[in-house]
Image (tube, rainbow, N blue to C red):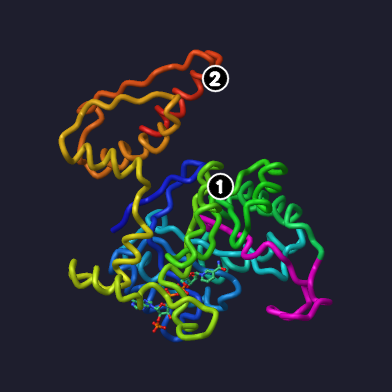
Amino acid sequence: MSRSLKLNNGNEIPIVGLGTYKSKPGEVAQAVKDAIDAGYRHFDCAWFYGNENEVGLGLNAKIDDGTVKREDIFVTSKLWNNFHEKKCVLPKIKETLAALKLDYLDLYLIHWPFGFKENAPLWPVGEVDSYSDVDYLETWQAMEECVKQNLTKSIGVSNFNAAQIERILENCTIKPAVNQVEVNPNLNQKKLIDFCKKHDIVITGYCPLGRSEFAGTPGFPDPTIFDPKVKEIGEKYRKTPAQVVLNYLGQPGEVETAILNAIEAGYRHFDCAWFYGNEKEIGNAFNEAITKKLIKREDIFITSKVYITVKFFLQLLFIKDFVAALE
Ligand SMILES: NC(=O)c1ccc[n+]([C@@H]2O[C@H](COP(=O)([O-])OP(=O)(O)OC[C@H]3O[C@@H](n4cnc5c(N)ncnc54)[C@H](OP(=O)(O)O)[C@@H]3O)[C@@H](O)[C@H]2O)c1
């Protein structure tokens, strides 16, 4: 149904996913089944949502009836704040897997960068004694163990800022593949997205339509889906305001768009260079065009160039990166 992005470990994540937070008991299994029939392949779950059992019923019903195979779907779950201690992490991912009735997750995230004591309430707002001082670097070591034990294919974080991710990058053996944060036109997260791009970390944006439960509340911007301009664009293109916003957020970057437009316009010779600093994005666009069968690899002629002040072996590495993006 939708495009995928390549994670820094080579796995792919479909760009559109079904959120399961606040999905009601008695309804969520059916919602998951309907979503699979509608083409969704990415499901965003969490221990905290308290409904992984039912989400698992929906997923397994569609695997059992042959609509999808396990490897066709991408399932994310998240470690809740009360379980940041190293000893809690493996038992918690195993609890999630048992609830979902799956052998492995595609992605496991630390839900928030701050932790609560294990026996504290699940959301002890203002109860200072309930906060834990476990460093999320300790948690990250246990997240890496989850990959080593094949309990999840990828690991990442959620609601982390750049400084917090930097600490993980300096102290990890497996880099975070994803940072899941709120992203919508009122909270575009440009700086954080640029930071994550630089470190090859994919951003998953939640609340893409904004927070309509706070509409009209002083101090909260109205979600963009209520913006008259968005409504007007929707009317012009016969799309709902939600479709306009999702299309805007899911746009490929400027370089990818330019290459895809050029391919569509008939260009077949692309002049690139390491020095231009955009070969990764160009490679992603070629990759997308080839995957969508708009062109074959042999239809396009690609030039790249070495740069004189960079040592030769480094340039070889960059060429390898470029070729890897094309594969
Ligand atoms: N990592 C985290 O900390 C975190 C935090 C929050 C969310 N998430 C993830 O992100 C998922 C999505 O969260 P979300 O808050 O964006 O939930 P959502 O289910 O997408 O809905 C957000 C709001 O948008 C409205 N809405 C949904 N579809 C609409 C449409 N087609 N047209 C107009 N309005 C529409 C809903 O209104 P109605 O209520 O009227 O339907 C709802 O109030 C969650 O389920 C969860 O998986 C993660």
Q: According to the image, label 1 marks what residue?
A: 195
Q: Which residues are magenta?
A: 104-132
Q: Quadrant of the C terminus?
A: top left
Can residue 129 be found in the magenta stretch?
yes
Helix, strand or loop status at disc 1: helix
Q: Quadrant of residue 124?
A: bottom right
Task: Give whichever of discs 1 and 2 has the lower sequence position.
Answer: 1
Q: Which residue is mark 2?
A: 314
Determine whether 36 is above or below 260 in the image.
below
Is residue 67 found left or right of 180 in the rendered image?
A: left
Task: Give me the residue at 35% from left, 75% from top.
Answer: 227
Front: mark 1 or 2: 1
Majority secondary structure of the magenta segment?
loop
Q: Position of residue 190 (x, y in %)?
A: 50, 54
Residue lying at 37% horizontally and 47% vertically, measured from the top left: 253
Q: Position of residue 117 (x, y in %)?
A: 79, 72
* Mark 2 neighbour density, 10 Å: few (under 14) some (14–19) many (20 or more): few
Identify the amino acid type marked 2: Leu
Q: Amino acid at mark 1?
A: Phe
Give residue 208's position: percent from left, percent from top. 43, 67
- Asked if 44 appears above or below 175 in the picture, the reply is below
Mark 1 to mark 2: distance in Å?
23 Å
At x 20%, y 36%, the residue is: 295
Identify the image quadrant of residue 256. top left
Q: Quadrant of the N terminus?
A: bottom left
Give coordinates of residue 42: x percent, y percent.
41, 61
Asked if residue 114 is positioned above or below residue 147 in the image, the reply reads below
Tell me if 192 is positioned left or right of 2 in this view: right
Farthest left residue in view: 266
Q: Are marks 1 and 2 in contact (CB under 8 Å)?
A: no
